[in-house]
Amino acid sequence: MMVRAYAYIRTNGPDGLRAVSENAILNANYIMRRLEEKYPRAVQVKGTLRETPIPPEIPCQHEFVASGTRFKPFGVKTLDIAKRLLDYGFFAPTVYFPLIVPEALMIEPTETESKESLDHFIETMLLIAQEAEETPDLVRNAPHTTPVSRLDEARAAHPKTMNLRYRRDTPVP
C-alpha cells in the first residue's frame, strides 16, 4: 500500500496533488448541491443533529454525509438505497457512519471522475429517491441484478458463521 501511495505522490508531484485535491472537493460539492433536495446534508451544530440545506457559502471537503431519513415514511432505509445502487452498477457508499447521523449516507467521489460520470451518479440517486417514494418495495428488496442477493447481515456477522481460515474441504453453509 505504501508503495502505491508513494508512486501516486511522485507521479502527480506538488502541483498535481493540489489539482487532484481541488477536483475531489469540487466533485463532492457538485454532487452535494445537486442532491440536497432529496438527500439533505446532515450536519452537527452545537451538539445537536439537524438536517438542513447548507447555505452555498459553506462547502464540504472531499466527502459529505447525507441523510436518508426522508424515506423512512416509505419504509426505505439507507442500506436499501445503497443496495439499490448496486443494481445500477455503482459501488455502495459507506452507510450508517458516522453513528451520530441517523440514516447516514457518506458520499465520497474520487478526484478523477468525469462530469459525465458524476451526472450519471446524480441521476441514479434521484431515480432511486423517486423509486423509494413511488415503489418502495423495489428499493427495499434490492439488489435485483447482482449474482448474490441481499445477505442476512445478522447471520453473516455471527461468529458461528465466520471462518477466519480458508479450508478447501469446508462446505459452504
Image: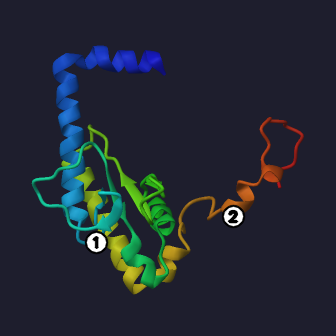
Between 77 and 10, which is closer to the camera in this rendering? 77
Hey, what amino acid is under mark 2? Answer: Asp
Q: Which residue is mark 1?
A: 38
Q: Are marks 1 and 2 in contact (CB under 8 Å)?
A: no
Query: In the image, residue 164 lies at what x, y percent?
Result: 77, 38
Q: Tell me if residue 61 comes above or below residue 88 in the rendering.
A: above
Closer to the chain start, of discs 1 and 2, is: 1
Between 120 and 64, which is closer to the camera in this rendering? 64
* SS at mark 1 in the image: loop
Q: Residue at x 63, y 59 (%)?
A: 148
State which quarter of the image contains the C terminus.
bottom right
Hey, what amino acid is under mark 1? Answer: Lys
Q: Tell me if residue 8 comes above or below residue 75 in the rendering.
A: above
Q: Which residue is mark 2?
A: 152
Q: Residue furthest left?
A: 57
Q: Tell me if residue 57 comes above or below residue 5 in the rendering.
A: below
Neighbour class for label 1 at 10 Å: few (<14), some, many (≥20)?
some
Query: In the image, residue 39 lies at what x, y percent?
Result: 31, 67
Query: In the image, residue 83 lies at what x, y percent?
Result: 50, 63
For residue 109, say whether it is visible.
yes
* SS at mark 2 in the image: loop
